[in-house]
Image (cartoon, grey):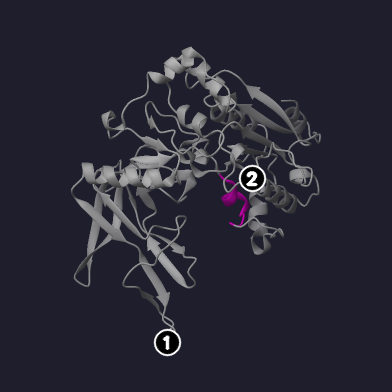
């Protein structure tokens, strides 16, 4: 508040960096919205951003990569913005505060890149270019991927942007499970539990009440697993169990003809990696799906958004039916609002999605495929920042600290 008043009185305040800490369900995302609302009334510009697309939409922000035009590879040396500098500088030159959500998933290389990029944009050698950073998250939740260390882990051989520059504020009141005090208290214990620590008899009894055979659980309830292999297996089995009208959608892969220079569609898709658009999609009308790309964050079309596939739309190409669009009904009714069907008499609660385009790691191959996957189940890494009324959670094959805690704490009771 003092910084805001000093800004109004045209004095240069001391920029402070704050970490807002708090367990799952303590209202961190709600607090971000409140900070944004209050501070933006006083300060010129207040961007709010997140590591993941889903979290970014939850706080009406965008991702760090899209805001700062960060490269996919964060390996040194630092890559300046080049011709994009003026564009990004015009967007952020007057910004005073940067809010980062889900900071537990931000790696040290990413944080260092954010610092370097803001220094470049602001033309300042001060940490983060002189901007105040509000980092929101819970380090008991999921750490950065690919074995990167969390920001709170001090390593003497590395430049530390965390310990020296941030003070911590902790939220303690759980809001997500406020109507189930016993469950909320148990989650607090699981959050800090060591591997060899024993749960109390009361907590064991509470957890035992929820144990059930997967076959007895309604198939439309979201299943949460630790690994992609478990997710893929459950999705395939459930699709075959619930749907008979399965449509196979092959990726359209193109490669340049060395003689003509034209991009020619290949007869069969190449074998891609998990991070690329899928080689083949097996879907059905009525099936649960999830977006796997950030299409437009401000519209809620983000990686991790859930939907129901309403219709598969095809056209004839060389006497063969070719899938051209998918009609989706998003779980979040505000998502994709600018892409909804507005035809007279037609439904206005559905969105249409077309094929996205990727350059495969295989040299010279361009892939066009729908950026979706089946979502009767998903991994624990996909549900951080999510709230559900019910879910089936499998704790088999947990491989990182925080995974069990994140999975169990998604539900309200």
Q: Is residue 317 above or below residue 206?
A: below
Instruction: Provide the residue span drawn in magenta.
Output: 63-72
Comes first in the chain, label 2 or label 1:
2
The location of residue 76, given as percent across then percent down, is 70, 58
Judge left or right: residue 244 versus residue 100.
left
Q: Is residue 27 above or below residue 148?
A: above
**Along the line of sight, the residue nearer the viewer: 254 or 324:** 254
Residue at (27, 35) in percent of width and height = 219
- Residue at the front extreme of this rendering: 196
Decide if residue 370 is in sight here. yes
Q: Which residue is mark 2?
A: 107
The location of residue 211, given as percent across then percent down, is 36, 24
Quarter containing the N terminus: top right
Judge left or right: residue 35 versus residue 56.
right
Q: Residues within 10 Å of mark 1 (few under 14, many from 20)?
A: few
- Residue at the bottom extreme of this rendering: 259
Distance, label 2 to label 1, CA atoms, is 45 Å
Q: Which residue is mark 1?
A: 259
Given this view, does label 2 or label 1 mark the residue nearer the observer? 2
Q: Residues within 10 Å of mark 2 (few under 14, many from 20)?
A: many
Decide if residue 345 is in sight here. no
Residue at (38, 68) in percent of width and height = 253
The location of residue 200, given as percent across then percent down, is 52, 15
The reply to whether dot 2 and dot 1 touch (C-beta < 8 Å) is no
Q: Is residue 30 above or below residue 114?
A: above
Where on the picture, by quarter, is residue 313?
Answer: bottom left
Quarter containing the C terminus: top left
């Amino acid at each position: 508040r003092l910084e805001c008043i000093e800004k109004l009185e045209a004095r240069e305040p001391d920029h402070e960096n704050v970490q807002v800490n708090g367990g799952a369900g303590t209202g961190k995302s709600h607090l971000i919205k409140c900070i944004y609302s209050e501070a933006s009334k006083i300060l010129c510009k207040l961007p709010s951003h997140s590591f993941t697309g889903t979290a970014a939409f939850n706080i009406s922000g965008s991702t760090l990569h899209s805001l700062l035009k960060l490269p996919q590879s964060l390996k040194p040396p630092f890559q300046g913005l080049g011709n994009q500098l003026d564009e990004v500088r015009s967007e952020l030159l007057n910004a005073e505060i940067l809010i980062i959500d889900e900071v537990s998933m931000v790696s040290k290389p990413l944080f260092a890149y954010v610092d370097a990029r803001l220094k470049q944009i602001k033309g300042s050698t001060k940490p983060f270019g002189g901007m105040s950073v509000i980092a929101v998250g819970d380090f008991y939740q999921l750490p950065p991927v690919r074995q990167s260390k969390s920001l709170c882990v001090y390593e003497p051989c590395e430049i530390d942007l965390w310990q020296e520059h941030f003070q911590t504020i902790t939220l303690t009141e759980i809001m997500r499970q406020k109507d189930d005090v016993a469950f909320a208290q148990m989650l607090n214990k699981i959050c800090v539990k060591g591997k060899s620590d024993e749960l109390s008899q009361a907590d064991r009894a509470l957890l035992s009440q929820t144990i059930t055979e997967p076959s007895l659980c309604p198939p439309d309830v979201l299943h949460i697993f630790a690994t992609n292999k478990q997710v893929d297996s459950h999705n395939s089995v459930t699709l075959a169990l619930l749907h008979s009208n399965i449509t196979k959608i092959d990726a359209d892969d193109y490669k340049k003809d060395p003689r003509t220079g034209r991009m020619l569609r290949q007869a069969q898709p190449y074998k891609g990696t998990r991070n690329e658009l899928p080689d083949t999609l097996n879907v059905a009308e009525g099936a649960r799906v999830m977006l796997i790309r950030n299409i437009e964050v401000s519209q809620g079309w983000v990686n991790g958004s859930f939907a129901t596939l309403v219709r598969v739309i095809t056209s004839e190409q060389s006497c063969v039916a070719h899938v051209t669009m998918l009609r989706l009904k998003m779980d979040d009714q505000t998502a994709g609002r600018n892409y909804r069907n507005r035809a007279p008499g037609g439904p206005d609660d559905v969105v249409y999605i077309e094929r996205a385009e990727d350059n495969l790691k295989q040299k010279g191959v361009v892939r066009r495929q729908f950026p979706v996957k089946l979502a009767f189940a998903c991994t624990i890494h996909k549900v951080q920042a999510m709230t559900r009324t019910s879910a089936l959670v499998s704790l088999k094959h947990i491989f990182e600290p925080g995974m069990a805690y994140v999975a169990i704490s998604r539900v309200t009771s």
